[in-house]
Amino acid sequence: MMQASKAYEANFDGLVGPTHNYAGLSFGNVASRSNEKSVANPKAAAKQGLRKMKRLADLGFQQGVLPPLERPSIRLLRDVGFSGDDASVIARAAREAPELLAAASSASAMWTANAATVSPSADTEDGRVHFTPANLAAKLHRAIEHGETRRTLAAIFADEARFRIHHALPGTPALGDEGAANHTRFAREYGAKGVEFFVYGKSEYGQGPQPQRYPARQTLEASRAVARLHGLSGDATVFAQQSPDVIDAGVFHNDVIAVGNRTTLFCHERAFVDQHKVYDELRTKLEAQGTPFTALEVPESEVSVEDAVSSYLFNSQLLSATDGRQLLIVPQECRENARVAAYLDSLASRKTPIDEVLVFDLRESMKNGGGPACLRLRVVLDDAEHAAVNSRVWMNDALFPQLDAWIDRHYRDRLAPADLADPKLLAESRAALDELTTILGLGAVYDFQR
């Protein structure tokens, strides 16, 4: 058997942007809609995410930082017919189409699990790390992200000999792609060839069940297209359908009902269509590589789908520590739901692959429907690939205080939807991002810098 190269999984978390607000833009996301029109605290949101990054870095994990996108997006507002100087564009949009101003102002790029799908070099035909930015075609406020996301990824992963950054798939519902929120990877070690697991909500052209209440955002056709772009072989891919009934219960992405790491899949018993066939295919393909597979399935009798959605139990990070232990990173809401808390407490007495549970306060993100897993993009890197990454984006003792002070200088501690009409918010956001590109060494990645 070929010896696996030395590699590890890095997590790239998105910094929460200065326009973080609760506009309720995401139909199908229960938390987003239930907190619509409430007042947000961008400063607290950014600091909660930053503290998570630093704590994981302190625990020995490779932790990178992805910057916010430029918001409000004046480009979007001009594309839909608003003209004049930037302040006039914002004022007119606020009067005539506040829903478009809200979409243009969304800070949703903070959830970098939706930024792209990433395949490591051990899996790909050309031996490079492949990124496909998600087109996020289901929602206007997210469909405008992928061009900026690609530019940011190109600034961080610039070595074309080691990294391949594709364009997003065509922005049609038939190829709706939501990125790594519907993708995970299993392997004996991070540097070994693995099996990539793509989860979709529906097939645009095939037959099969579909949700009736909320839309299925990821299609089978999109998942297969990404696998082709990345040069993945058929014996190293598994495609599974999300249960339509859990989508209708508010599970808008697979990472709200399942999370995987190396040889472990942690999921709810109602996560997939033909669930045990999914396990069998994963196990067969992994065992063919000499890799064991464990499905840790949470029964409905202990944690309902509704409990999972309200607590974001499965929107957790499942991480392998340097000492070999497997950690589950959960939001504070898991401790506030009695059934979920009881389940987590029981892990110590069960023989499970999870060795420790760590709890994080991510309240501001959670109120908009994003937990620990939403905030990170997973990128497996070997030593040479790590050396080729823009070194200034790695979280460490020097970067943390810089970013903490940067947040203090630029972020508001209160932002209501009505505040999106304030033209000063655009100036504040641009000033923040202009300084951030210097801190992170990104160059001119934003439209206003060009």
Image (tube, rainbow, N blue to C red):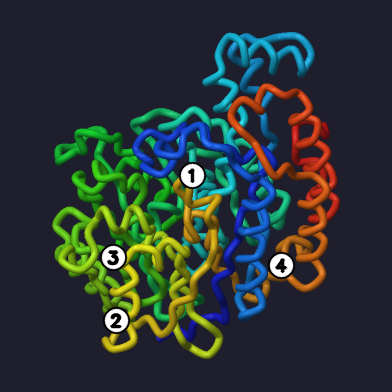
Residue 166 left/right relative to 399 = left
Q: Quadrant of residue 58?
A: bottom right
| Separation (CA) of disc 3 from disc 1 | 22 Å
- Residue 267 disc label: 3
> Which residue does the numbered mark 4 point to in the structure image?
395
Task: Give how far across and how far down residue 194 sits, in percent.
Answer: 40, 71
Numbered disc in front, either 4 or 2 = 2
Disc with the residue nearer the chain's start (3 vs 1): 3
What kind of element bears circle 3?
strand
What kind of element bears circle 4?
loop
Numbered disc in front, either 1 or 4 = 1
| Separation (CA) of disc 1 from disc 2 | 29 Å
Please rate how many residues cluster around mark 2, counting C-alpha atoms within 10 Å: few if below 14, some from 14 to 19, many from 20: few
**Any part of residue 430 in sight:** yes
Please rate how many residues cluster around mark 1, counting C-alpha atoms within 10 Å: few if below 14, some from 14 to 19, many from 20: many
> Which residue does the numbered mark 2 point to in the structure image?
346
| Separation (CA) of disc 4 from disc 3 | 30 Å
Residue 88 left/right relative to 48 = right
* Rendered view: 354 above or below 152: below
Residue 285 left/right relative to 362 = left
Please rate how many residues cluster around mark 3, counting C-alpha atoms within 10 Å: few if below 14, some from 14 to 19, many from 20: many
> Which residue does the numbered mark 1 point to in the structure image?
368
Q: Nearer the viewer, residue 244 or 428?
A: 428
| Separation (CA) of disc 4 from disc 2 | 33 Å
Disc with the residue nearer the chain's start (2 vs 3): 3
Q: Residue at x 51, y 76 (%)?
A: 191
Q: Quadrant of residue 425?
A: top right
* Rendered view: 306 above or below 92: below
- Residue 207 disc label: none
Quadrant of the image for the N terminus? bottom left
